[in-house]
Amino acid sequence: MLSNACQYAIRSILYLSIYSDKDNKIGVKKIAEELETPQPFLAKLLQQLTRSDLVSSTKGPNGGFFLSTANKQNAIWDIVTNIDGSEKFDQCFLGLARCEDKNPCPVHHITAPFKKKILADFKDKTIAVFTEELKNSRKIISLKEFDALQQN
Amino acid sequence: MLSNACQYAIRSILYLSIYSDKDNKIGVKKIAEELETPQPFLAKLLQQLTRSDLVSSTKGPNGGFFLSTANKQNAIWDIVTNIDGSEKFDQCFLGLARCEDKNPCPVHHITAPFKKKILADFKDKTIAVFTEELKNSRKIISLKEFDALQQN
DNA sequence: AAGAAAACAGATAAAAACATCTTTTTTGTA
DNA sequence: TACAAAAAAGATGTTTTTATCTGTTTTCTT
């Protein structure tokens, strides 16, 4: 449903949303270690996200990646479309070209409500709001094997 | 979530479940046309499914593929594991190695109920039951662009 | 018995996804 | 100003998935 690349991207941005700001930039090396993702691959991804204004960065010593206030006004959906495009996510569970309420695939009635719900979450909430909710949930939320928020 | 191959396989077996039996075998050519899938690729798939006893076949003139009564006692899940393996389907939406109720990813609370529901459907119902429900649903159910059951 | 229809088997090819490597550019700091 | 740290850019490599092609075997029909 989501490519590896897109999963890495979402996790990176949530990570940056929690731990970075313009005064606390984080390098690829650190991010890749924390999220347990392949470093050079993630570097490429972050470059692309930066070009697309979904992430901010500065070069040189003490440089790194961070989310500006503007960056945090984007939605998860913006990441998805930037990396995977919009069609891929919306595809039918069984791969049918035309699968909708009136012409459903055999599992449409199961998948449709789910897709609606997660699309709403991804499209409507900004990264800022999304992250705030995670923090307020008081649950342990993980971006890798263990709790990423607890260290905060 | 499901590979192309697995989607083709599920659709083929549902198709065969509806239209075939030991006295009405269907050739790859026909199946591929009806489901609008690449023919040689589907042929390979059906071979594998046949080797795994998920589908039956006979060679020679008037030969083809069909579902025996025994074949119809399998579940959709058996197809999934045969083609994609069991891990792939069960993966975390964000790709985390360990994502569970106690250590959830940021969208676990949305994805978990969905996965539970569709896994239940896929594991518990036999192909026979699944197909029967489709027929009884009185809805238009599609295995390709248009209604596949209506022709019945 | 001959021929044809169909699945079966194995090899190969093409495309996409995933990942890495090397060099260049920018920029802060000693 | 020289150096080093970090991202940026471009080229390349690997693996997986998807797909096709060619020939073989089985089996029905005439």
Image (tube, coloured by chain):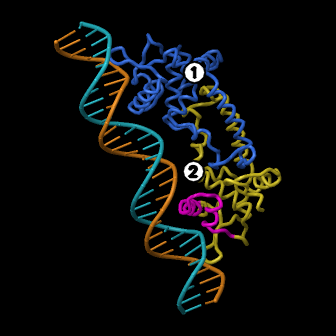
Chain colours: A yellow, B blue, C orange, D cyan
Magenta residue span: A25-48
> Dominant secondary structure of the magenta stretch?
helix
Q: Residues within 10 Å of mark 2 (few under 14, many from 20)?
A: few
Residue B136 versus residue A92 in the image, above or below? above
Along the viewing direction, whichever of B139 and B100 lies nearer the viewer: B100
Question: Which quadrant of the structure image shows residue A71?
Answer: bottom right
Q: Position of residue B135 (x, y in %)?
A: 61, 16
Residue B127 badge? 1
The residue tagged 2 is A4
Q: Position of residue B53 (x, y in %)?
A: 47, 23
The amino acid sitting under disc 1 is Ile
Between the C-alphas of marks 2 and 1, the distance is 32 Å
Helix, strand or loop at mark 1:
helix
Residue A23 versus residue B2 in the image, above or below? below
Helix, strand or loop at mark 2:
helix
Residue A137 in the figure: left or right of residue B152: right
* Residue at (67, 30) in percent of width and height: A110
Along the viewing direction, whichever of A61 and B57 lies nearer the viewer: B57
Quadrant containing the N terminus of chain A is: top right
* Residue at (67, 33) in percent of width and height: A112
Q: Chain of mark 1?
A: B
| Residue A53 is inside the magenta segment | no
Q: Residues within 10 Å of mark 1 (few under 14, many from 20)?
A: many
Q: Nearer the viewer, mark 2 or mark 1?
A: 1
